[in-house]
């Protein structure tokens, strides 16, 4: 019986280590980082993977644009990254640009504008311009305390 208990203890250590590693891997999952410029100001939008696109809200960019990034990494048959740009007019919000990429996106190591390339969307009334590009990133590991 003592041998059996010792065996279980030794066998469980690798299992617990593997489960802990899976937890770390899930915590450090990839995210989509989009860099956008409007009115001379550049900002970033970090987007984690979601199970459903329906709860993803867009963000206001200036007074005219809304930017929405939807990143689904599973199930594999619908895994994708979709970037929507809307015109936020007084009477309605209208989709004016959509870009769709497979997940995982093709790797373009060293490319200046990530997996998406540089996009430019223009305001027809005010002649403003929204530019964006996106890349895949992994969150930095948290510092040990």
Image (cartoon, rainbow, N blue to C red):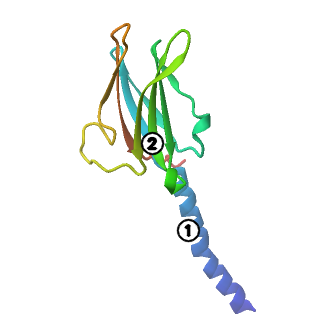
Residue 24 in the image: above or below residue 120? below
Q: Which mark is residue 81?
A: 2
Residue 84 in the image: above or below residue 18? above
Q: Is residue 39 visible?
A: yes
Instruction: Describe residue 134's horizontal placement relative to residue 75 as left or right.
Output: left
| Mark 1 surroundings within 10 Å by alpha-carbon count, few (fewer than 14), some (14 through 19), many (20 or more) | few
Judge by depth and name the residue closer to the eye, 4 or 104. 104
Badge count: 2
Mark 1 lies on residue: 18
* Quadrant housing residue 97: top left
Identity of the residue drawn at 33% across and 10% down: 127
Identity of the residue drawn at 53% across and 45% down: 49
On the image, the x and y values in percent for residue 40 come to: 33, 15
Mark 1: secondary structure: helix
Mark 2: secondary structure: strand
Which of discs 1 and 2 lies nearer the camera? The answer is 2
Judge by depth and name the residue closer to the eye, 50 or 141. 50
Q: Which mark is residue 91?
A: none
* Quadrant housing residue 61: top left
On the image, the x and y values in percent for residue 15 come to: 60, 73
Quadrant of the frame with the N terminus: bottom right
Judge by depth and name the residue closer to the eye, 124 or 31. 124
**Pointers 1 and 2 in contact (CB under 8 A)?**
no
On the image, the x and y values in percent for residue 119 come to: 32, 29
Residue 33 in the image: above or below residue 109? above
On the image, the x and y values in percent for residue 58 come to: 53, 27
Instruction: Describe residue 6's horizontal placement relative to residue 139 as left or right.
Output: right
Instruction: Describe residue 139's horizontal placement relative to residue 106 as left or right.
Output: right
């Amino acid at each position: 019986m003592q041998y059996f208990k010792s065996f279980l203890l030794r066998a469980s250590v690798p299992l617990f280590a593997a489960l802990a590693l899976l937890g770390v891997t899930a915590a450090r999952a990839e995210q989509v980082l989009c860099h956008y410029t409007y009115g001379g100001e550049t900002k970033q939008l970090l987007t984690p993977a979601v199970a459903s696109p329906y709860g993803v809200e867009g963000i206001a960019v200036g007074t005219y644009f809304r930017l929405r990034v939807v990143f689904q990494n599973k199930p594999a048959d619908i895994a994708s990254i979709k970037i929507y740009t809307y015109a936020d007019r007084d009477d309605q919000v209208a989709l004016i640009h959509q870009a769709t990429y497979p997940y995982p996106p093709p790797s373009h190591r060293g490319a200046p504008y990530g997996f998406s390339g540089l996009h430019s969307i223009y305001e027809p009334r005010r002649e403003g311009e929204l530019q964006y590009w996106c890349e895949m990133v992994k969150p930095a590991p948290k510092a040990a305390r």
